[in-house]
Amino acid sequence: MPLPSRRSKLTSRLTAAEQAALARFRSGDRGVAFQELVRGQLAALAGLARRILRDEHSADDLVQETLVRAYGGLDAFRGESSLRTWLLRILVHLAKEPRRWSRTPATPPEPLELEIPDSLGPAPDGPAVERELRARLDEALERLTTRQRTAFHLRAVEGMDYRAIADTLDCQPAAARMLVLAARRKVMERMEGYLEP
Amino acid sequence: MSLHRSGSAPECPWNDAVLAHFLDGDALSARVVEDGWERDAGPVELAEHRGDCDLCALALASARRLDALTASAAPTEVDPERATAWLDAAILEGEKARAPDLERACAPAGGAGVDREETVGAGRAVLLLGAVACVLFGVVLALFVARALRGDGERERPANVADAPSSPEADRAPASDTAVTARVAPSSDSQASGSPPPESSEDASVAEDTVVFERDGALVFPRRPTVLRVGASASADRQPSASTDERVGPAVPSVERLALSGASLDESYAAMAWLRARALGLPPAPDLIAELGAEGGDAVRRAALVEIRSAARSDHTVLPRIESVLRAWPRARVEAILAELRTDASLGRRIRDAVLGRQPSGVRVAAWIGGSHIDECLLQSVRGDVETADQIAVALAEFGRRPARAELLLGLARDARLQAAAGGEPALVRRWSTTQPAAFTWELLDVLRVSRNAGERRRCLLALAARRDVRATTALIELLDGSRLEEARLAAFALGCMPPGTDTLATRRVRRDELRLAALVCRRDPGIARRLDELPLTDEERAFLRGGAFSEHQLEVAAALLRPHRRSRVWDGSD
């Protein structure tokens, strides 16, 4: 149920455009307003879903379900956290049911084969180094627990601080700190030689 | 150096605290282990430790690269068709769900048309309702028993109760309990039922403190709404509402609080930037403050620019201040700030003056910022000064990516006086190249691809040899098979510096096979030993070849010895 407008104005962490879209959503122009509110957040949702589930199709399903839940819950959204944080919390919450989203049984990651470009090509600093580093990174991140992976993604990609990560994961900030630091340490161990100056 | 915790390389016990503070913006004191004891370390102590500890500095640099790599690997946009499909489906499903909600709630669990997921959800709801009913029953029972006991006590000691003064704490206790219940109960309910979780109560409490920057440069604090808080610390923070007339002076404690416990990392850093600018005695101009407080955009980047531009308007010590400002920000964000400064013409003149005057801060800041004009000044400023050149090389190594870094370093290495001071061109190139980050290899290959300057290409190949980066081997093998003899020799030298068994050099056929063999001998490739035994060589020559690890000149001699129909030239034992 929408709260009184005075409170929303005082505590809202939404931008003016988001507040306007939210007002239009509540006044009946739901479809257009929802698209306007959420379209800019889809990349963040897709990125986190893929990082958690490691399967593109399952991740798409998770994003889809997140949007459905968000559509249903947007009336009750008070704007006390940013819209992105709220959506990511829904996604993390839904992702806690791994059987629902896993289409294929989890397989251990295959050993990484380094790809060395076979010609100098037009742009040597382009695809080859990207592929190699990302393959290493994916391999290292897959060995983390889901909570570690999620916490590290929220820190490194979304730029959240420990408190926001704790809010998203429903834990204490100290626990979020431990998750982020442990994840980073493990990934750095796996990527030894690729990150050092 | 290894970062393995279980490996043989050492690891500093302060690593976590340093990373949490300098990378994640954990602004509060941190627990550190020293001599087997845990204790709190404040920001100043952490900063001092970071300056002294090479292990922590390395871990911090590596972690910064890791965060940047992770961020760059995440998708920045979604295919528009897919996005539209997602949104349309969500709206359709959402609208469908709105109408029959009531009917579905009344339908019997497990009945016809109810799928497995709904059955499980209904089961959970029944369990939850049962649990809530049990808790309520327990609470009512406890209240009933308590009231009965109190009634007994009153009946037994009516005079004492009437005389006892009621304490304020006792009066407040029930109110506090009510507040906790009011905040917690909706949260647990909504999560258990799978509905969207509520926004954070922490966010709500911090959002009250958000400073509003107005066009006239004054800081204004919004009137605080009445918000129920959980826990004693929250109530301890509570202060009287600040009126909209409050100005900069009285507002500072609130900004400090925001700096330490901002709703987001960006807000914390923005507030800290404001405090630093104020501590430096730099009254930020109203328009800059307004820029900082504007809606949307990157608050951190804008806050840094406010600081830097405020410093730029102050006095002649602008560059040390800019350096200190940049060092105070997370490294991943500094790269974005530097990109913006690169186009800031107002700073360009001051930086060029400082560089040509060889001010250390100016040289460092200029090396970070870069750009064609500034790089030209840096090249002019060195003029044989080894110390300045080394400062530039160190500054260039501080960021993962920096435009035209390879060109600048290779240009510096052209200086004959620097070469003489370092013991020759290869030694000078080696000294600077080995400390640069991983991206430097690709920058060198890029120079090699576009440059037509023979001297620059030579220094580039020497740098690749010094880096011993296996990602360059493919390009080097192509050069080894190319038409330019001098470059083929240097490419063989660079390939000879690579670790053995990391490429296809042993099985490749190239135009100058003796250079390929010399490179394999130089890196002491295991497969080349038998080949040496078959060659008609003197014992001395064979011993020389078995030694490997040649200098550039020795590699040429080795190639001459390994030539299929070698001439009369033999190794005379000299380099």
Image (cartoon, coloured by chain):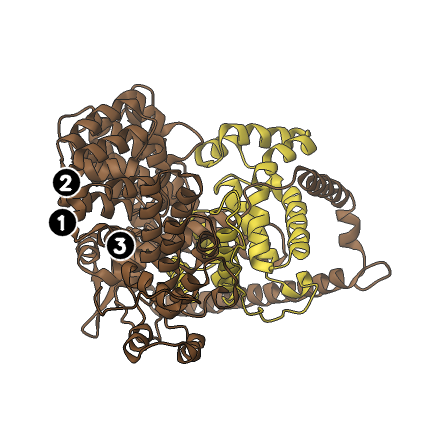
Chain label for disc 1: B
Instruction: Check residue B430 in the rendering and tell me which mark sits there, or answer none.
Output: 3
Q: Is residue B119 above or below residue B202?
A: below
Q: Are marks 1 and 2 in contact (CB under 8 Å)?
A: yes
Give the percent coordinates (x, y) of residue B260: 29, 46
Q: Quadrant of the N terminus of chain A?
A: top right
Residue extending farthest front:
B568
Q: What amino acid is labelled 1 in the image?
A: Ala
Residue holding disc 1: B421
Q: CA distance from mark 3 to mark 1?
A: 13 Å
Mark 1 or mark 3, which is nearer the start of the sequence?
1
User: What quarter of the picture does the C terminus of chain A occupy?
Assistant: bottom left
Q: Do dots 1 and 2 share one subunit?
A: yes
Quadrant position of residue B249: top left
**Residue A74's quadrant in the figure?**
top right
Give the labeled residue for mark 2.
B384
